[in-house]
Image (cartoon, grey):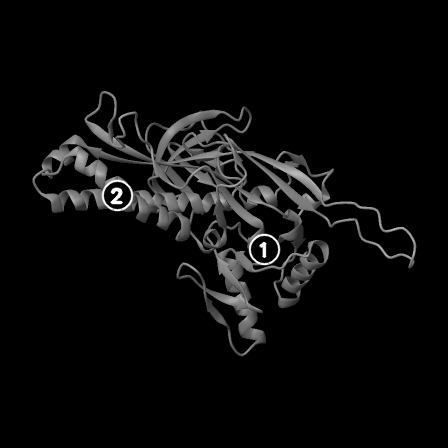
Amino acid sequence: MVTLTSADNALKTLYLGVVAEQLNTAVNPLLARIEQTSSDVWGKEIRKLAPFGINGGIGAGTEDGELPASAGNNYAQFVLTLKNLYGTIEISDKAIRASSDNSGAFVNLLEAEMEGLIRASKFNFGRMLYGDGSGVLCKIESVSGNEITVDSVSNVMEGMVVDVIGNSGKTAVVSARRIVDIDREGKKITLNGSALTGTATAGDFLTVQGSYNKEITGLGAIFGDTQTLYGLTRASNKWLMPYKKTAETLSDVTIQKAIDTLEEAAGSVADFIVCSGGVKRAYQDYLITNRTNIDVMNLQGGYKAISYNGIPVVSDRFVPAGTMYILNTADFHLHQLCDWRWLEGDDGRIIKQVHNKPVYTATLVKYADLICDRPIGQAMISGITEA
């Protein structure tokens, strides 16, 4: 007979390892290449010494003259607060009782919930890797009833629960509305509930429920225009500024110039290129026009990619349109307090009843954030005409 205790044990022993493996390696090709570590985590913060420049204790001299004065490595301290990442499944008491005498039916029920959690977690975690930490999904251009027209629908999916953040006060003007329909061609999103007219206005933006300014510090922060990064001022630390170039037409020369600049400025060796789908198609068109074949390579996690001089070129839906990132993934680390874990109560139980509701929930949690040790060793080409 299936009980809450047996379900609790199944989540702990059978599902946790599978879920953690999926979320650590199968989110996207970029995450599969990033090392995950518990080093440099101090309490609720990440504090990391990052070297920059080179050692200064080098010099030439005479046969019997003084030796070069010592001048050790340069270090700066990065400081970030660990981000709190959650994923929750929900099962009604009625569903549990209906399948209590049929273990097969209960397993199917539990597996369906876990698969849904994994899909949602993959989508949102993959999105965060390319975000700037603000959690902004898209900006509102117009409102009609409970339908909003936005500037992009690449970061949204049916079923997401979102807040509308006011552009002026930067606070939620509408909270916890579920996306029930998306017109991707017209870039229109329909939310459940009452009309938004008069509450949400053009210029406001959407975030995942309760997530505004609480997400992972992704590529959007590294390549953004903010004055600070990891607690340091960019103006006083020029090595925090990555290479950025605008180029309408993509070519091997454009890519090679970015790679050469990284090597010259930071000794950084690019090993991964990721771009939007339209940019990847534009590059494929360029290869077809100028070459006889397109090289394909296999990546960790079962992914495939086209190749630029042995460097994989992949596309991701969350990369901004017209953009290509050229990265040295060895410079990236996902610092975490622990790997994915179930949130447990004092009694060790992970399945808990929702107060005043005939529903049980279990919550998956991870405390982590992303740091790039050498922002100057990364490149972005934007403004590319997509195919």
Q: Mark 2 Cα within 10 Å, few/some/many (few <14, many 20+)?
A: few
How many numbered dots are placed on residues in this image? Answer: 2
On the rendered structure, is 338 left or right of 245? left
Q: For this rendering, which residue is in front, 270 or 179? A: 270
Query: Please, is residue 146 above or below residue 58 in the view?
Result: above
Name the residue rendered at 73%, 38% in the picture. 235
On the rendered structure, is 67 left or right of 249? right
Picture coordinates of residue 11 (x, y %)?
Answer: 25, 40
Residue 225 seen anywhere in this rendered image of the structure: yes
The residue under label 2 is which amino acid type? Thr
In the rendered image, the residue lying farthest to the bottom is 292
Name the residue rendered at 49%, 50% in the picture. 35
Disc number at residue 13?
A: 2
Q: For this rendering, which residue is in front, 244 or 99? A: 99
Marks 1 & 2, CB-CB < 8 Å contact: no
The residue under label 1 is which amino acid type? Asn
In the rendered image, the residue lying farthest to the top is 356
Q: Secondary structure at mark 1?
A: loop
In the rendered image, the residue lying farthest to the left is 101
Name the N-terminal-most of marks 1 and 2.
Answer: 2
Name the residue rendered at 42%, 28% in the picture. 197
Picture coordinates of residue 50 (x, y %)?
Answer: 64, 43
Name the residue rendered at 37%, 33% in the picture. 146
Picture coordinates of residue 57 (x, y %)?
Answer: 79, 49
Which residue does the numbered mark 1 point to in the structure image?
Answer: 328
Picture coordinates of residue 132 (x, y %)?
Answer: 54, 40
Residue 302 position by quadrant: bottom left
